[in-house]
Image: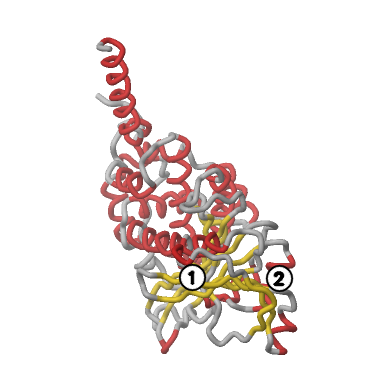
Amino acid sequence: MNTGKYVFSQLLDFVNKYEFDKCVKRHFGDYRVHDLNCWNQFLQLFFGQLASLNSLQNICLCLKAHKRKLYHLGIKQNVSVSTLSRANEKRDWHIFAEFGDFLINLVRPLYAGSSVPNLNLDNELFALDSTTISCSINLCTWAKGKYSRGAVKMHTLLDLRGSIPSFILITDGKYHDGNALDVINFIADAIYIMDKAYVDFLALYRINNAGAYFVTRAKSSMKYEIIEQNYNLDETTGLRADKIVVLKVAKSKILYPEKLRLVEFYDEENDALLVFLTNNFEVFPLEIANLYKNRWQIEVFFKWIKQNLTIKKLWGHSENAVKIHLWTAICTYLIVAYVKHSLKSNLSIYEITQILGVSIFDKTPIRELLTQDVQFNQIVENLQYDLFVNNP
């Protein structure tokens, strides 16, 4: 008989309960709590994310069906839907957000050496964007979106080295994307890549004053004066212009009084001329185009979490419950990324998530589950080496 630990329990070995408890204590999360403390609340929501369960009712149903295994899973007890729902309504969402920040600071450095396609830069590279999650305005009255509809926005600053989020802000749907720039602490020498929605010259100048760089799309209505132009461009690469400019409109010039750089690039595939705006005068013009091209990694990230984590159907209706739900999803992604790096698995985060989702109640050692391809490749390499040595 296999007396090993369940895969879910093995996963918890990678989760720092001590740091989570510190977050709980800071916000008095377990004050006068008897039935379901914050740790077990997190574990049940974490279980729901891994198992792709689309409601609290399904989480409670599955845990109740396996109640004899809960102790060995690491979960203290199963609770009713109303108990779990009340916990999501009343426990401070900052507990889960701060634990998510701890995981971000833990995981991001592990992927700092990852390469970015078509770029050979040492700078930290970030893509900024938001994704919208539709909801019922009648149930989520706080989450007002466009056209009298309900919507929740998750603003994300994604580290392009490893696709690890470094900043998350959850708001209602009417919160303008550009306002997220006001709450981000910019890192010197880092490059921030964003689309036209973030062209706010006051915020862009704050990035410049922080010693950081930005790359964005210029609005067609922007008025400027050309100071200098580079005519030595290889148009076969798609480059059409590389200019140093200053803003002409008085108000814009007050908000951003320094020089800017405009790089024009022809996208042959989409038959479109793209005009990029940046404060980086050091990198080659083609690298500016490649930097913006890598912004699509954040679109892939949003698509991935919507398809592989449970966020499209919310587990609660209050602002507190929604933020706990979304932060738990982000924590799940970060824990899987941490497991991938710790086990040196060559499987993608998507593949690992799929394997873990169907192996929660399995007792196979997690290293064996997630590194089979590595072991197989090693065996093949050894066989090839033996054949080569023995049969010169």
At 59% from the left and 63% from the top, the residue drawn is 192
Q: Which amino acid type corresponds to the residue marked 2 in the rendered image?
A: Arg
Q: Nearer the viewer, residue 216 or 77?
A: 216
Q: Nearer the viewer, residue 363 or 301?
A: 301
Specify the label residue 98 is tagged with.
none
Q: Which amino acid type corresponds to the residue marked 1 in the rendered image?
A: Phe
**Circle count:** 2
At 28% from the left and 25% from the top, the residue drawn is 380
Q: Nearer the viewer, mark 1 or mark 2?
A: 1
Where is residue 73 drawn, in percent x and y?
37, 40
Find disc 2 in the rendering and name its residue. Answer: 206
Where is residue 115 drawn, in percent x and y?
50, 47
Find disc 1 in the rendering and name its residue. Answer: 265
Q: Nearer the viewer, residue 136 or 243?
A: 243
- Report helix, strand or loop for mark 1: strand
Where is residue 117 drawn, in percent x and y?
46, 52
Q: Is residue 60 left or right of residue 291?
A: left
